[in-house]
Amino acid sequence: MRKVCTKRSGELLDTRAVRSLLVLHCQDAGGQSAFARSVGVSRAFIHSVIKGASPPSPKLLAAMGLRSAGERWTRAR
């Protein structure tokens, strides 16, 4: 998998950055359906998060190597 972000561990990411990172993870996996299967969520949920209609779930954040930090997210350690 290619490096998708060069941000330091612990730096907070806003919603737009998380959605952009999700798009890159989907591309690396071969599409939204493939990434959704690997995470164990529906493709519709992935699409909803990318479009900003739903917040990312803890399961999705963990699959992207992130964790919640209130209203923002940070790289998991």
Image: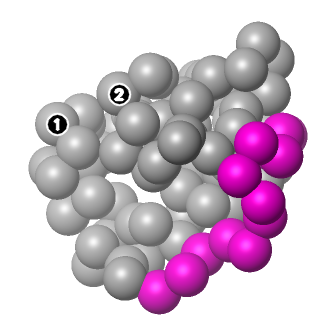
SS for dot 2:
helix
Provide residue 18's location: percent of width, then percent of height: 68, 48
Pair 2/1: label in front: 2
Looking at this view, is 19 or 67 the one in front? 67
Report which residue position mark 1 lands on. 40
Looking at this view, is 70 or 34 the one in front? 70
Identify whether 43 is placed above or below 32.
Answer: above
Residue at screen point 20% across, 63% down: 34
Q: Which mark is residue 27?
A: none
Residue 68 visible to an observer of this rendering: yes
Identify whether 31 is placed above or below 60.
Answer: below
- Which residue type carries mark 2? Lys
- What color scheme is it? one colour
Q: Residue 59 carries which label?
A: 2
SS for dot 1:
loop
Residue at screen point 76% across, 42% down: 10
Provide residue 71's location: percent of width, then percent of height: 81, 17
Provide residue 36's location: percent of width, then percent of height: 25, 48
Identify whether 30 is placed above or below 2.
Answer: above
The magenta region covers 2-14
In the rendered view, does 48 fall on the left or right side of 33? right
Label 2 neighbour load within 10 Å: few <14, some 14-19, many 20+: some
Looking at this view, is 8 or 34 the one in front? 8
